[in-house]
């Protein structure tokens, strides 16, 4: 019969979901950037891909990239120990104080098929437990963060004009909190991602633009010579430029009576604009 300590080690190994030779990306929560264009509905941030030994891919649904960004199909194996049902007598030579009967309950794949339960097993020593922080790793891995939906005024294909302020912002769906929950029997942990910072790179070599919130939405009737109060840029030369927006997400988790945080994640998207010189109009009226 396995000792209780040995079974706990097995449970933790199952929760980590990686072979002993695989890189443990989940151990360090490296920041992740999701880069795709044009606007997709989103990409799944991966912090240690469950089910394939911790490999990561490029956010397009397949293939390892090793660049720290990726997507995952959400499938994973998670196990926990629960007291066995019924009033089972200790095995020969054991007393109730020596340990207890437990069953191993596992969620396989996406968990839709329900839990799988082992036969009762006697475990010596203190009852095995599952650390909520380990389940939090899976919840973070299942977060789906939208790419920034870049908005510009004037709206392309309309052209921007040199020395005329360009307003920049992102759509509301790009600036909304996101959450994901991971569970094993008896324990659920929810990870929440909140957007905290928006930065634009205008593409003309100028400094980055740090915005307040998601920027201010342009509305018809505003003075076109007026600068955005929260997020904008004025081009000083004509040309074609690529605007890049990067959103920083603050990640926290809660469950099992515990809370925690992991390093920020980022999402990035780009959009092209054309800048031209405005042509003056001759309004002189001949007599």
Image (spheres, rainbow, N blue to C red):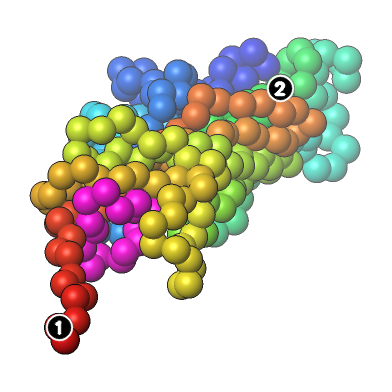
Residue 163 in the image: state x and y as whole percent. 27, 49
Residue 166 in the image: state x and y as whole percent. 34, 53
**Rendered view: 71 above or below 155:** above
Callout 1: helix, strand or loop? loop
Measure the C-alpha gap from mark 2 to mark 1. Answer: 95 Å
- Which label's residue is closer to the chain start, 2 or 1? 2
Mark 1: few, some, or many residues within 10 Å (few <14, many ≥20)?
few
Q: Residue at x 46, y 24 (%)?
A: 29
Q: Residue furthest front?
A: 287
Give the quadrant of residue 274: bottom left
Callout 2: helix, strand or loop? loop
How would you classify the magenta stretch by its main secondary structure? loop
* Residue 191 falls inside the magenta stretch: no
For marks 2 and 1, give the one nearer the viewer: 1
Mark 2: few, some, or many residues within 10 Å (few <14, many ≥20)?
many
Res 128 label: 2
Residue 218 in the image: state x and y as whole percent. 46, 63
Q: Which residues are magenta?
A: 146-168
Q: Residue at x 55, y 26 (%)?
A: 262
Q: Residue furthest left?
A: 239
Give the quadrant of residue 158: bottom left
Quarter of the figure that contains the N terminus: top right
């Amino acid at each position: 019969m396995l000792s209780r300590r040995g079974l706990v080690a097995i449970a933790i190994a199952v929760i980590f979901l990686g072979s002993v030779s695989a890189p443990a990306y989940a151990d360090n929560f490296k920041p992740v950037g999701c880069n795709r264009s044009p606007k997709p509905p989103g990409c799944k941030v991966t912090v240690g891909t469950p089910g394939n030994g911790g490999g990561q891919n490029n956010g397009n649904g397949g293939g390892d990239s090793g660049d720290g960004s990726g997507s995952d199909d959400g499938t994973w194996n998670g196990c926990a120990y629960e007291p066995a049902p019924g009033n089972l007598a200790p095995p020969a030579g054991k007393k109730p104080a020596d340990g207890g009967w437990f069953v191993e309950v596992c969620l396989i794949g996406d968990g839709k098929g329900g839990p799988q339960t082992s036969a009762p097993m006697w475990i010596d020593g203190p009852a095995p437990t599952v650390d909520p922080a380990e389940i939090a790793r899976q919840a973070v891995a299942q977060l789906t963060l939208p790419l920034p939906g870049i908005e510009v005024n004037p709206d392309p294909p309309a052209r921007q004009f040199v020395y005329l302020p360009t307003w920049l912002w992102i759509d509301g769906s790009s600036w909304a909190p996101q959450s994901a929950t991971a569970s094993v029997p008896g324990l659920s942990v929810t990870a929440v991602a909140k957007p905290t910072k928006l930065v634009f790179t205008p593409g003309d070599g100028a400094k980055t633009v740090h915005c307040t919130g998601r920027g201010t939405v342009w509305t018809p009737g505003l003075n076109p010579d007026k600068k955005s109060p929260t997020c904008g840029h004025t081009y000083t030369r004509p040309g074609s430029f690529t605007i890049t927006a990067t959103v920083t997400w603050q990640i926290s988790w809660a469950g099992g009576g515990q809370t925690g945080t992991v390093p920020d994640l980022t999402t990035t998207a780009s959009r092209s604009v054309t800048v031209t010189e405005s042509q003056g109009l001759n309004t002189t009226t001949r007599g």
